[in-house]
């Protein structure tokens, strides 16, 4: 952890993986682009061998690397913790962080997850130059419950939060819509059926709840003075752009097309846009205080 007089460290990373079928030339091109931008890399890896291969294309040995662990890893599962420890041990000094998804049962089985966090923290503390383990907001928890979890482990030095602003924003829009529409899912409107034109104003009101919800979460998490990692991407409940069926993972410049006209336009802005992104990043850096900040685009 940083001391009160230590300079704040802010690391900017991008998602670094082969997103399209092809050969290693695509990875070498990514290497060049990341090197030109001076960016670190966030990599997905299933095994140590896969991670070694991806890291062979990193732009610089000095560029920070954060590894996104497989999505089926569960903090409360001993086997997942052991695999996490093995990766941390093997890549200590070369990787600055590991990212693990949170889980819906973190509320129902709070004691189990708190004990698991303390166990993995004790393991990681034994490794010199060990990466941080970041637990990502991904399962749609009530943001207050996510904050409560980290408040209860504020003393742990090697376990910190990862805030995925797209996940938080979509969850906020869903919650706002469900409060006025009897538990309906706003994302079900993405088919843009006959009901949407009369409901679009309420959709946009629900979408507008995303930014303040993210900023509130940043405020609360930052007050813990722990290192925080951010996933920065945009989204919209009506989006059908993702091949995986999610409503986020969009560019901050992407508008969502409509099949009708609304306010003299045939598209709506995303959750945050460039102005919202600027507010989030400024707030995160301004409140960092006792912990480093990193973010992946």
Image (cartoon, rainbow, N blue to C red):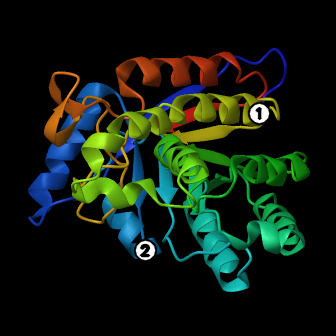
Question: Which residue appears at 62% of the width and 63% of the height?
Answer: 88
Label at residue 220: 1
Please say if 253 is above or below 31.
above
Residue 199 image position (x, y, % from top left): 35, 43
Q: Nearer the viewer, residue 113 or 247?
A: 247
Whether residue 280 sits left or right of residue 40 in the image: it is right
Picture quadrant where residue 201 is located: top left
Whether residue 61 sits left or right of residue 133 in the image: it is left
Residue 258 image position (x, y, % from top left): 18, 41
Please say if 74 is above or below 296.
below
Q: Which residue is mark 2?
A: 46
Question: Which residue appears at 41% of the width and 42% of the height?
Answer: 61
Residue 193 image position (x, y, % from top left): 22, 57
Sequence order check: which comes first, mark 2 or mark 1?
2
Does residue 8 appear in the picture of this structure?
yes
Check the picture and name the quadrant holding the N terminus: top right
Whether residue 278 sits left or right of residue 87 in the image: it is left
Picture quadrant where residue 90 is located: bottom right
Task: Give the alpha-carbon distance from disc 2 to disc 1, as whole Å.
Answer: 32 Å
Q: Nearer the viewer, residue 158 or 195?
A: 195
Question: Which residue appears at 36% of the width and 61% of the height?
Answer: 188
Does residue 157 appear in the picture of this structure?
no
Label at residue 73: none
Residue 212 image position (x, y, % from top left): 60, 28
Kind of element beneath mark 1: helix
């Amino acid at each position: 952890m940083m001391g009160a007089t230590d300079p704040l460290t802010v690391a900017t990373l991008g998602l670094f993986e082969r997103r399209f079928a092809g050969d290693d030339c695509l990875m070498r091109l990514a290497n060049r682009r990341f090197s030109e931008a001076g960016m670190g890399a966030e990599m997905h890896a299933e095994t140590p061998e896969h991670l070694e291969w991806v890291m062979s294309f990193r732009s610089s040995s000095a560029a920070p690397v954060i590894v996104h662990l497989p999505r089926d890893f569960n903090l409360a599962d001993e086997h997942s913790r052991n695999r996490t420890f093995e990766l941390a041990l093997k890549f200590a000094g070369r990787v600055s962080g590991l990212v693990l998804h949170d889980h819906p049962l973190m509320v129902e089985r709070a004691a189990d997850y708190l004990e698991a966090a303390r166990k993995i923290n004790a393991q990681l503390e034994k490794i010199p130059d060990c990466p941080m383990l970041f637990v990502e907001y991904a399962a749609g928890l009530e943001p207050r419950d996510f904050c409560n979890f980290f408040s209860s482990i504020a003393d742990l030095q090697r376990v910190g939060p990862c805030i995925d602003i797209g996940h938080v924003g979509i969850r906020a829009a869903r919650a706002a819509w469900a409060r006025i529409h009897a538990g309906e899912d706003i994302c079900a409107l993405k088919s843009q059926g006959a009901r949407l034109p009369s409901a679009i104003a309420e959709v946009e009101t629900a979408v507008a709840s995303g930014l303040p919800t993210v900023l509130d979460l940043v405020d609360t998490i930052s007050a813990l003075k722990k290192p925080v990692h951010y996933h920065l991407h945009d989204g919209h409940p009506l989006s059908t752009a993702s091949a995986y069926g999610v409503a986020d993972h969009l560019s901050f410049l992407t508008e969502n097309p409509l099949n009708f006209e609304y306010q003299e336009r045939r598209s709506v802005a995303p959750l945050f846009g460039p102005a919202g992104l600027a507010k989030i990043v400024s707030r995160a850096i301004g409140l960092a205080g006792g912990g480093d900040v990193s973010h992946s685009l």
